[in-house]
């Protein structure tokens, strides 16, 4: 184990940039891929875009489960590094990989057996159902790529080697971006595969990214000893991973569940409304990916210094992360308020749909700064082993407050009113989150000794 890990020694601002910077860059590339994917699919037809939008919730549940598992691994592993306990570091890494393999098997079976039913629950348009079903089955059957990519990235991030994590994610995202037009439209002699091509490009990129991160872990990650021959699953280690990972997993799955619920409400107005929602989810990632990338780095920093009992470094890193969050989300709010029409023209051709989208984006974007602060504080809860509190806050924000309010407003038969549910839910959730943080700070952080 490295004796002087940078998470316990570098100045806070430099540390946050060093740890989070590569993650932010790689996640922005991933966000770019998501938008490029929708851009190319939209060129097929609006039904094709709607199919991918409706398939998104299940696809993103996979990402949520893999990310949640990775957070459980990473937070525990970083804390063990801070405690200088090599055996626990190794145990968390190997048991986490084992859990990833089990998850892959689960989603392979789930996708093959339920993809069509899942699409049919959201729409009765045959073309959308068939296209979305094919897309989902490919993405779930080859889910080893996304699980391998995310879990092995988390191992690199947890040990402070975020540059290599960035290279792995860049490999996957850039592969997707290059293959999308080739496989969707049949360029360079390849067959024209449409939505099927988009799915194939996605899984090839994920598998490539996973392969690169595995190599980096084996070659450069000296903080972890991957002795697979002596590995035996540990119930106690798995419990510790899932004590943080399951709430984080559910937390990361709230977005697709929210999207599913909103799609059910919006489909009552038109398929165009669901297409707007799908485009919004992809585009807002440009705003929140930097914040989420910072969250990933912040979790490792706070968990490491919690294990080392360094109170000032924990508080300093939280304050710095909040400042950067304000910068990112503030810029995003301005961009969405001013340039929404120009952005949406890349995806929406119908004038009426475009006008609906402009109103929706301007209403929802006023909540970006509020949501950014909530994300940062929830990352602190996860780093301190209190993921259930993060789950409560995000559950209120994306489900318990948002969906009932959206449904009530939908009864007014005015689509523009439905979007007001977003600022309502975000504001209430932030107030609750601040109250929880003040209590946690008093009971845990301020009782640590430097």
Image (tube, helix red, strand yellow):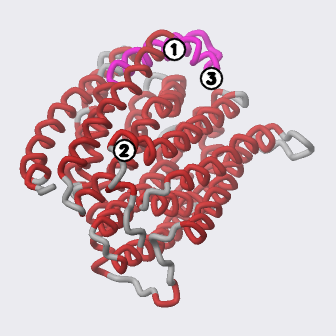
Quarter holding the N terminus?
Answer: bottom left
User: Secondary structure of the magenta portion, mostly?
Assistant: helix
| Numbered disc 3: secondary structure | loop
| Residue at (81, 37) in percent of width and height | 185
- Between circles 3 and 2, the one closer to the viewer is 2
Residue placed under numbered mark 2 in the picture:
295
Contact between labelled residues 2 and 3, with CB atoms less than 8 Å apart: no
Residue placed under numbered mark 3 in the picture:
347
Q: Earlier in the sequence, mark 3 or mark 2?
A: 2
- Between circles 1 and 2, the one closer to the viewer is 2
Q: Residues within 10 Å of mark 1 (few under 14, many from 20)?
A: some
Q: Earlier in the sequence, mark 1 or mark 3?
A: 1
Residue sitting nearer the eye, 98 or 163:
163
- Look at the image and give the residue range highlighted in magenta: 339-368
| Numbered disc 2: secondary structure | helix
Q: CA distance from mark 3 to mark 2?
A: 30 Å
Residue 149 at x, y percent in the picture: 56, 59
Q: Is residue 16 magenta?
A: no
Q: CA distance from mark 1 to mark 3?
A: 12 Å
> Above or below — where is 203 with respect to 126?
below
Q: Residues within 10 Å of mark 3 (few under 14, many from 20)?
A: many
| Residue at (13, 43) in percent of width and height | 436
Quarter holding the C terminus?
Answer: bottom left
């Amino acid at each position: 184990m490295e004796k002087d890990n940078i998470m316990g020694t570098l100045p806070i601002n430099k540390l946050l940039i060093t740890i989070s910077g590569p993650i932010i860059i790689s996640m922005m590339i991933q966000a770019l891929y998501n938008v490029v994917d929708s851009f190319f699919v939209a060129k097929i037809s609006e039904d094709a875009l709607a199919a991918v939008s409706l398939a998104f919730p299940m696809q993103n549940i996979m990402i949520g489960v893999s990310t949640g598992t990775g957070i459980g691994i990473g937070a525990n592993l970083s804390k063990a590094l801070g405690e200088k306990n090599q055996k626990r570091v190794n145990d968390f890494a190997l048991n986490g990989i084992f859990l990833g393999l089990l998850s892959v098997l689960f989603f392979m079976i789930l996708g093959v057996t339920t993809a069509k039913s899942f699409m049919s629950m959201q729409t009765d348009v045959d073309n959308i159902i068939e296209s979305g079903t094919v897309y989902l089955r490919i993405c779930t059957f080859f889910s080893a790529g996304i699980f391998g990519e995310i879990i092995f990235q988390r191992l690199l991030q947890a040990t402070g080697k975020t540059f290599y994590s960035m290279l792995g994610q860049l490999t996957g995202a850039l592969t997707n971006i290059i293959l999308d037009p080739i496989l969707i439209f049949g360029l360079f002699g390849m067959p024209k595969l449409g939505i099927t091509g988009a799915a194939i490009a996605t899984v090839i990129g994920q598998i490539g990214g996973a392969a690169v991160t595995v190599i980096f872990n084996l070659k450069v990650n000296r903080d972890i000893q991957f002795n697979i021959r002596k590995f035996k699953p540990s119930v106690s280690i798995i419990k510790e991973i899932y004590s943080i990972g399951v709430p984080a997993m559910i937390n990361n799955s709230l977005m697709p569940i929210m999207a599913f619920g909103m799609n059910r409400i919006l489909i009552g107005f038109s398929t165009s409304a669901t297409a707007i929602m799908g485009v919004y989810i992809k585009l807002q990632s440009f705003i929140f990916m930097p914040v989420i990338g910072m969250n990933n780095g912040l979790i490792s920093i706070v968990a490491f210094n919690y294990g080392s009992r360094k109170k000032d470094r924990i508080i300093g890193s939280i304050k710095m992360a909040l400042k950067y969050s304000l910068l990112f989300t503030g810029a995003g709010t301005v961009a969405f308020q001013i340039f929404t029409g120009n952005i949406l023209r890349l995806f929406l051709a119908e004038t009426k749909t475009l006008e609906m989208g402009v109103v929706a984006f301007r209403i929802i974007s006023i909540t970006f700064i509020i949501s950014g602060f909530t994300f940062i504080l929830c990352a602190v809860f996860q780093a301190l082993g209190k993921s259930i509190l993060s789950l409560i806050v995000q559950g209120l924000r994306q489900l318990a407050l948002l969906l009932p309010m959206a449904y009530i407003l939908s009864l007014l038969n005015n689509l523009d009113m439905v979007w007001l549910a977003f600022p309502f839910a975000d504001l209430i959730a932030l107030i609750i989150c601040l109250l929880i943080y003040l209590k946690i700070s008093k009971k845990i952080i301020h009782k640590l000794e430097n």
